[in-house]
């Protein structure tokens, strides 16, 4: 009976600490994607803009590569 009482007391004393850590991790992750850059855009918006720019750049480079291949062959 004494062991059970000791374990319950230990669990009760650690539950608030663990809950605080879980809430802190959750908030830091959710706020990380919502934090604003100096321009006012969220980090998610900035990442999407960078991805779109990378795709445009890849398409441009692909057109340049095709034009160079045609020039070398003909």
Image (spheres, rainbow, N blue to C red):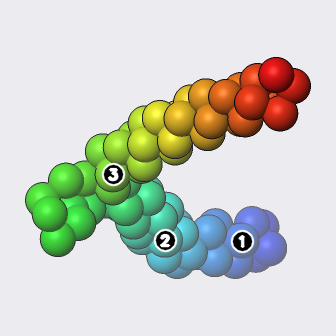
- Alpha-carbon neighbours of circle 1 within 10 Å: few (<14), some, or many (≥20)? few
Q: Nearer the viewer, residue 60 or 25?
A: 60
Q: Nearer the viewer, residue 1 or 14?
A: 14
In the picture, residue 24 is in which quadrant? bottom left
Q: Is residue 40 visible?
A: yes
Q: Report the side of 73 relative to 57 (left or right).
A: right
Residue found at x 83% / y 33%: 72
- Alpha-carbon neighbours of circle 2 within 10 Å: few (<14), some, or many (≥20)? few
What residue is disc 3 on? 46
- Mark 3: which secondary structure? helix
Residue 21 in the image: x percent, y percent? 49, 71
Q: Report the side of 27 relative to 69 (left or right).
A: left
Q: Quadrant of the N terminus?
A: bottom right
Figure check: 12 above or below 56: below
Residue 66 in the image: x percent, y percent? 71, 26
The label on residue 21 is 2
Label located before the other in sequence (1 or 2):
1
The label on residue 7 is 1
Residue found at x 33% / y 51%: 46
Q: CB of mark 3 within 8 Å of CB of mark 1?
A: no
- Mark 1: which secondary structure? helix
Distance Cα–Cα, label 1 vs label 2: 21 Å
Label located before the other in sequence (3 or 2):
2
Residue 10 in the image: x percent, y percent? 63, 77
Q: Is residue 44 visible?
A: no
In the picture, residue 62 is in which quadrant? top right
């Amino acid at each position: 009976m004494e062991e059970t009482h000791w374990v319950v007391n230990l669990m009760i004393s650690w539950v608030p600490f663990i809950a605080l850590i879980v809430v802190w991790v959750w908030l830091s992750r959710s706020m990380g994607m919502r934090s604003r850059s100096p321009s006012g855009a969220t980090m998610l918006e900035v990442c999407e803009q960078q991805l779109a720019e990378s795709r445009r750049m890849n398409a441009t480079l692909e057109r340049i590569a095709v034009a160079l291949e045609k020039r070398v062959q003909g």
